[in-house]
Amino acid sequence: MAKRRKRGDGSVHLRKDGRWEGRVVVDYDDKGLPITKNVLAKTKTACLEKLKALKESCGEKPNENMRPDMAFGEWLDFWYQNYSKPKLRPKSQLDYENSIYRHIVPALGKIPLSELTANDLQQFYAQLKKSGRLNRTETYGEGLSDRMVRACHTRCLTALNRAIADGLIRVNPAADCKLPPQNPKEMQLLSREEMQRFLIQAKEEGYYELFLLELATGLRRGEVLALQWDDLDFKTGALRIQRQVYRANGELVVSSPKTKAALRTIILPPALLGVLEEHRQQVDSRWMFPSPTKQDLPLDPATVRKRLQTILEHAGCKKVRFHDLRHLFVTTALENGMDMKTLSAIIGHVSAKTTLNVYTHVTDTMRQTAAVKIDRGIGKCEPPSGSGKGLLTQTPNPPPKAPFEPYKGKIRKPGTGCVTQINDHLWEGKFSPKWPDGKKHSRSVYASTETECEEKLAGLIQQMKAEIAEARRLVSEGNWEAAMVLATQKQARGTRKMDLLA
């Protein structure tokens, strides 16, 4: 009987071509799946020697301070700092550190690595699901989401797999744990009519080119916002996707995409190129969609997310996420006969299998097409015409609807304050200028009509501008205290809010 090799030593077998192949696990990916490397040799002895050299070059020997009886929290920290963190992007590092140092280590960190059991982990996951949330419990409840519980499990599984590879433990206790089911959010699709209203409203609010490009290409939000004019060849229509933008630690970060498949080139249709050509004449920036407030930076992904919801609300459409627009592109492409391999390359997936599993959505149009094909095969008839013949009947054309009129919001110019209606007979005007101390000090006026409120607000703005000029004069003379008295004094003139409420 052949001698069984020890766990972590790798495997050796004879190939059909007569050579010996050795394979060993050198690392684990973010999902806990093994990453292997192999060597080839003419003899088994030479193969074993090459395999040993491969293990040593990949750092298979554990650190001298690593031992089976060390605390699980100590091992988890060592694994994250040395094996995982160097490969992660800043945003992913924050996610890892949040799950490791705020959840896993406080609950399981003191248990010896060799004594950690599946029962310990299972109870930990149950506690996370029941009362694991550390903040904003009044909004989201006391328990963590299924996604966060599964993320904590993945960290434990991958770290323990690494401990097996380093010879610290023999069995991974996280391998047989039961986890909450994966319940991905159902993606919402805009109807054709909603899409038209959405684009009309987006044009009214200055985001037409951005969302038209998204609906025509299905780019990820970070990819479309990171586009520069040099990425687009207007002669050929070739658009290169070679960077992405995201927010980490409160700042915008521009980097290359995570996978090689995300680095791609797509061809834009001539009509879209014409729209972008006109948009380019109005943009004085290297970014295709620059930030209106920050110099030489693209639009903030959070700003686009909020603006999307505002446009949808004004257009009378259902609420969808930005990623749902990408899903809408995929579904539309499938309905129009695009093959899965081409579609997968356009949207930047590693394989067509991912596209099938994640994005394929059976729409009413696809169901109707399938029904027509069945009708042809079973009923032996042509697609239903206006006469209604065949197994399927054709629904009459709906009457034409009135053209959509976009919502035209009133945009106030900077320095004119704001006016808000509190109730049916109360309006508030507020002005919040910046004073010499660098802070904004606001004052308000109240009136029973919008016109009266605008008049009072204009008077308030003139008064406050005069006081700011006086405060600057006092500061220049060194009388800081008197300047701050002007900044913090309340509005005493005019109708008060309590008087109108009474």
Image (cartoon, rainbow, N blue to C red):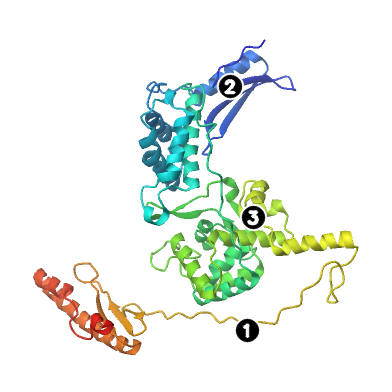
- Which is nearer the N-term, disc 1 or disc 2? 2
- Which is nearer the N-term, disc 3 or disc 1? 3
- Which is nearer the N-term, disc 3 or disc 2? 2
Mark 2: which amino acid? Gly
Q: Which of marks 3 and 1 is in front?
A: 1
Mark 3: which amino acid? Ile
Label 3 Cα crowd, 10 Å radius (few <14 / some 14-19 / many 20+): some
> In this view, which residue lies farthest toward the right?
380
Q: Which of marks 3 and 2 is in front?
A: 2
Question: Which of 350/386 is in front?
Answer: 386
Q: Distance between the residues labelled 1 and 2?
A: 71 Å
Q: Name the residue under label 2.
A: 10
Secondary element at image label 3? helix
Secondary element at image label 1? loop
Compared across the picture, whether 427 is left or right of 199 comes to left
Q: What residue sits 37% from the left and 55% below the top?
A: 138
**Measured along the vertical axis of the image, is residue 141 above or below residue 198?**
above
Q: Mark 1 points at which residue?
A: 402
Secondary element at image label 2? loop
Mark 1: which amino acid? Ala
Q: Mark 3 points at which residue?
A: 346
Label 1 Cα crowd, 10 Å radius (few <14 / some 14-19 / many 20+): few
Residue 339 image position (x, y, % from top left): 73, 54
Question: Which of 417/396 is in front?
Answer: 396
